[in-house]
Image: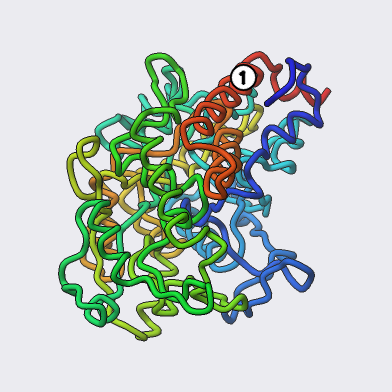
């Protein structure tokens, strides 16, 4: 449990802002990728020809422009090259504004960005994860975009509902989603289904059927599970897994009317109980041994897992390897809480915002609008950076719909009703869920007790964040 209220010191702010960033699996929101160079813990996979290592990342603005805007970008590798091309396309679309790109890594935290804002040297634009909107708004590091949106004619009905929800906080628009990441389509190994006597063209529709299929697929050798139907607790991290299955059971994680987090919702608790029961049936989560420790890709690609959620890069890699036939569809659900297949789907993504103190907010919004809510800009972004747009009028969506690799994600994008709760202590909430879910899976806590604890801790932290001072006061 957390201790009594303490003043928001600089050290404490950076700790709160970064809570969960290290543990949370951000692949489910289009996490940036790229080679950071040699060194312990870095990605040493060779980059494609022409892709810069992060040490040299950046882009100068086009010469001879009246105004130069600076974008702090979290992206490295291939995505960084996409942002350069997108910025160049914007520069070609008009003659007055040049775009400088500066590499500034970070997710829920971004020390370089926050220090720049506090020091009066804010960039004109920055990248952020949508669920961080309330946290950044409460810290006073964002520019209110409501009037800009109104003058541009950008309205609620033009964006996917979950994305629009994340763009707003306390009746104001603070950021614009240029990416709406669909989490998750559902995939199954058709060859493995056929091998154990299941119909390869009939995936499970309910969680009960997932259990039935899993019982036929599971295989144990030497005390280890060497083949498994599904690993419910490992769908890109514990908290991402619980969000997915919690909604698939019909649960909710936040009540906007009371402004309370609700992990203790009956259906969320039932989803966690199911995850824990699935682990207990095989002797515990540590009994799973379906892939070698040195495996670089997703373990579903080994052919030893029957069913899984997959983000786009993993799906493409496994499909290209051609080791087995895959089926694609929507997530199973569990009545009576949920009513239909796909109920567990949700949107992650990335956004652009204008930091408080930006010198060129008008030009910054024009670039933001180009990337996030114009036909040309959203198409350029999709073709170069490669992420699905949140703006429903983008021609990229038709291209996505007709792409066999992207069609499963398109189906989630246009039907998903949820996103991770955007609250002032969002990162803390997700980190706390990760912590207590681990204790439930290992039998140290019951699901009900763990979710009650997660609620109490998160609500206390939410109040602390709301009572904290603005960033420039915090870092003073």
Query: Which color scheme does this rendered protein use?
Result: rainbow
Residue 359 visible in the snapshot: yes
Q: Which residue is mark 1?
A: 460
Q: Position of residue 413 (x, y in %)?
A: 29, 50
Instruction: Report the residue at 24% width, 71% height from top.
Output: 327
Assign a secondary structure to mark 1. Answer: helix
Q: Position of residue 14 (x, y in %)?
A: 74, 35
Instruction: Report the residue at 36% width, 26% height from top.
Output: 151
In front here: 438 or 63? 438
Quadrant placement of the N terminus? top right
Residue 96 visible in the snapshot: no
Note whether 17 is above or below 275 in the view shown.
Answer: above
Q: Position of residue 336 (x, y in %)?
A: 20, 36
| Residue that protrudes farthest toward the right in the picture | 476
Quadrant placement of the C terminus? top right
In the drawing, does residue 249 fall left or right of residue 178?
left
């Amino acid at each position: 449990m957390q201790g009594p209220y303490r003043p928001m010191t600089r050290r404490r702010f950076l700790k709160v802002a970064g809570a969960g960033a290290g543990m949370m699996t951000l692949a489910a929101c289009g996490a940036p990728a790229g080679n950071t160079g040699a060194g312990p813990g870095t990605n040493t996979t060779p980059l494609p020809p022409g892709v810069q290592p992060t040490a040299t990342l950046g882009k100068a603005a086009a010469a001879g422009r009246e105004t130069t805007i600076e974008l702090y970008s979290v992206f490295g590798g291939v995505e960084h090259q996409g942002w350069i091309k997108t910025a160049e396309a914007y520069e070609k679309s008009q003659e007055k504004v040049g775009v400088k790109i500066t590499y500034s890594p970070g997710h829920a935290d971004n020390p370089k960005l926050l220090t720049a804002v506090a020091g009066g040297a804010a960039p004109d634009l920055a990248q952020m994860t949508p669920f961080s909107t309330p946290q950044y708004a409460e810290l006073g590091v964002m520019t209110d975009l409501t009037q800009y949106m109104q003058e541009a004619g950008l309205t609620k009905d033009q964006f996917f509902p979950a994305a629009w929800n994340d763009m707003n906080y306390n009746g104001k628009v603070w950021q614009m989603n240029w990416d709406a990441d669909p989490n998750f389509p559902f995939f199954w190994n058709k060859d493995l289904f056929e091998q154990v006597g299941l119909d390869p063209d009939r995936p499970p529709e309910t969680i009960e059927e997932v259990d039935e299929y899993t019982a036929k697929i599971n295989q144990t050798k030497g005390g280890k599970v060497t083949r498994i139907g599904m690993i419910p607790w490992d769908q890109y991290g514990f908290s991402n897994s619980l969000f997915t299955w919690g909604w698939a059971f019909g649960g909710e994680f936040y009540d906007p009317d009371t402004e309370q987090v609700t992990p203790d919702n009956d259906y969320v608790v039932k989803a966690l109980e199911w995850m824990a029961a699935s682990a207990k049936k095989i002797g515990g989560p540590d009994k799973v041994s379906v892939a070698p420790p040195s495996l670089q890709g997703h373990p579903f690609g080994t052919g030893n897992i029957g069913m899984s959620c997959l983000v786009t890069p993993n799906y493409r890699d496994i499909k290209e390897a051609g080791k087995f036939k895959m089926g694609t569809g929507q997530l199973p659900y569990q009545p009576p809480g949920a009513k239909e297949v796909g109920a567990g789907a949700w949107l992650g993504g990335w956004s652009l915002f204008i930091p408080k103190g930006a010198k060129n907010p008008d030009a910054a919004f024009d670039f933001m609008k180009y990337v996030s809510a114009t036909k040309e800009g959203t198409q350029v972004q999709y073709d170069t950076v490669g992420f699905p747009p949140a703006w429903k009028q983008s021609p990229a969506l038709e291209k996505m719909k007709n792409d066999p690799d992207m069609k499963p994600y398109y189906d989630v994008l246009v039907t998903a009703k949820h996103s991770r709760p955007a609250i002032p202590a969002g990162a803390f909430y997700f980190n706390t869920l990760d912590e207590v879910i681990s204790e439930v899976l290992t039998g140290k806590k019951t699901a009900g007790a763990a979710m009650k604890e997660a609620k109490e801790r998160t609500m206390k932290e939410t109040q602390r964040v709301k009572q904290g001072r603005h960033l420039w006061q915090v870092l003073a």
